[in-house]
């Protein structure tokens, strides 16, 4: 990547096989990655990289989805430096018949 400032990327479903590959690829490119996982970080927890920040959140619950967004925006102002939100990778597979509880 030929950027002076690294990209700041939020990846949902980061613990899935595809999500994990995306995370690894972006970290190799020196990106800052916020990876969301539902219940088990799996192999993500074995990555030792200060550019990776993990957040556990069940996105079928409104309050946890809201918490993820708030955590990501807090990440963008770490150390008093304002960072721009560059990319969002939506890597979630919904089960057939799964309900989405998005009421407050």
Image: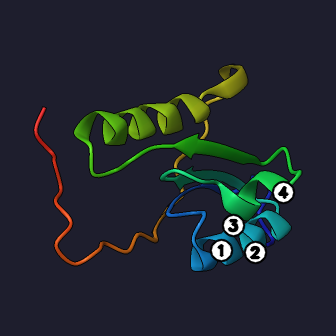
Counting residues from the start of the chain, the first of labels 3 and 4 encountered is: 3
Counting residues from the start of the chain, the first of labels 4 and 2 encountered is: 2
Res. 23 mark = 3
Circles 3 and 4, Cβ within 8 Å, touching? The answer is yes
The quarter of the displayed image where residue 17 is located? bottom right
- Could you classify mark 2 by the number of other residues whose Cα lies within 10 Å: few (under 14), some (14-19), or many (20 or more)? few
Circles 2 and 1, Cβ within 8 Å, touching? The answer is yes
User: Looking at the image, which residue is at 53% across and 43% down?
Assistant: 56
Q: How far apart are labels 2 and 3 at the CA level?
A: 5 Å
User: Looking at the image, which residue is at 69% across and 44% down?
Assistant: 53
Instruction: State the residue position of label 4.
Output: 47
Element under label 2? helix
In front here: 97 or 54? 97
Q: Taking 3 as reference, is 75 above or below it?
A: above
Instruction: State the residue position of label 2.
Output: 25
- Give how far across and how far down residue 1 sits, in percent: 79, 72
- Could you classify mark 1 by the number of other residues whose Cα lies within 10 Å: few (under 14), some (14-19), or many (20 or more)? some
Element under label 4? loop
Q: How far apart are labels 1 and 4 at the CA level?
A: 13 Å
Circles 1 and 3, Cβ within 8 Å, touching? The answer is yes
Circles 2 and 3, Cβ within 8 Å, touching? The answer is yes
User: Looking at the image, which residue is at 39% across and 32% down?
Assistant: 67
Q: Taking 27 as reference, is 82 above or below it?
A: above
Element under label 3? helix
Res. 22 mark = 1
Residue 101 appears left or right of 51 = left
Front label number (1 vs 4): 4
Front label number (3 vs 4): 4
- Give how far across and how far down residue 18 sits, in percent: 59, 79
């Amino acid at each position: 990547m030929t950027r002076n400032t690294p990209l700041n990327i939020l990846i949902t479903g980061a613990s899935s096989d595809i999500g994990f590959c995306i995370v690894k690829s972006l970290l190799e490119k020196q990106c800052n990655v916020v990876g969301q996982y539902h219940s088990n970080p799996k192999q993500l927890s074995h990555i030792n990289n200060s550019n990776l920040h993990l957040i556990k959140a069940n996105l079928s619950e409104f309050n946890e989805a809201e918490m993820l967004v708030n955590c990501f925006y807090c990440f963008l102002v770490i150390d008093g430096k304002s960072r721009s939100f560059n990319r969002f990778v939506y890597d979630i597979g919904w089960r057939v018949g799964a309900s989405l509880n998005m009421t407050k």
